Image: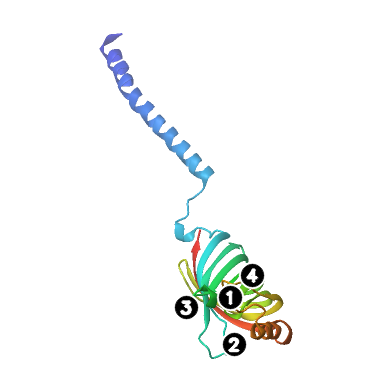
Amino acid sequence: MGVLGALAVAGQLAVAPTTLASDARAESDASAGAREAFVGPVLPASLSPASNDWWVVSVAAEQFGRDPDSLDALYGVSVMYRLDSWGPHLLAMSKPNSGGFEDSRFLAGAGLRGYLPVLGTEMSYGVSVHAEARLEDHFWLAYATPLELGVVLYSKNSWDLELFFGARRAFAGELINHFLIDPNGFDNENAADELERVTELEPWRGFVRLVFGRRLD
């Protein structure tokens, strides 16, 4: 073969591993590129599309006094499941009284709201039904709320502050005759008169509620 032939063969053997390594790297890069093209680019969290369903857990306060200038209020919690622009929700509120549960009030209900973006915020229209045990007045009531308007006053990150106002109508009610509330208050005449007033004479009643909630994705 001669000296020159031997040198040529040795050179080819030296170059072959380098060529194979380069080919392997090129094939690996091509496979990675194909995988990236298949998967697509990954957006940062700030640019990722928002989920169209989430939970909102809130604390709420509602003015309820017979006198519009009174400071009587119900306090409680609200849980809402937002599904796109719809918001079915539950509400539980009470008026605690240090004098005893017989002087308290309890309200619970369920409803549905529809949300609409307006001028950089969200507004809502809702309907609901509620039941209220007015132990201090010796009767219970059932309400229907055909009108509830709401507006988001403040929204930052996962926190929202909403204001709701509307009107509800009492459509059922009955005296609560129980000795734990008032041993001497069975068929109380004053309670019966008040029940008649709120169910027959003045069944409609306005309300204002402030709700501060947090979104839970």
Residue picked out by circle 1 = 183
Type of amino acid at the residue the image marks with label 4: Arg
Image depth: mark 1 or mark 2 in front: 1
When the figure is inspected, residue 63 is found, relative to residue 59, above or below; the finding is: below
Residue, x 60% and y 80% (percent of image)? Answer: 137
Q: Are marks 1 and 4 in contact (CB under 8 Å)?
A: no
Disc 1/disc 2 C-alpha distance (Å): 26 Å
Residue, x 52% and y 44% (percent of image)? Answer: 39
Disc 2/disc 4 C-alpha distance (Å): 27 Å
Residue picked out by circle 2 = 66
10 Å crowding of disc 1: few (<14), some (14-19), many (20+): few
Residue picked out by circle 3 = 99
Image depth: mark 1 or mark 3 in front: 1
Q: Are marks 2 and 4 in contact (CB under 8 Å)?
A: no
Type of amino acid at the residue the image marks with label 2: Arg
Pick the front one: 27 or 102:
102
Q: Quadrant of residue 32?
A: top left
Type of amino acid at the residue the image marks with label 3: Gly
Question: Which one is earlier in the sequence, the residue at label 1 or at label 2?
Answer: 2
Disc 1/disc 3 C-alpha distance (Å): 16 Å
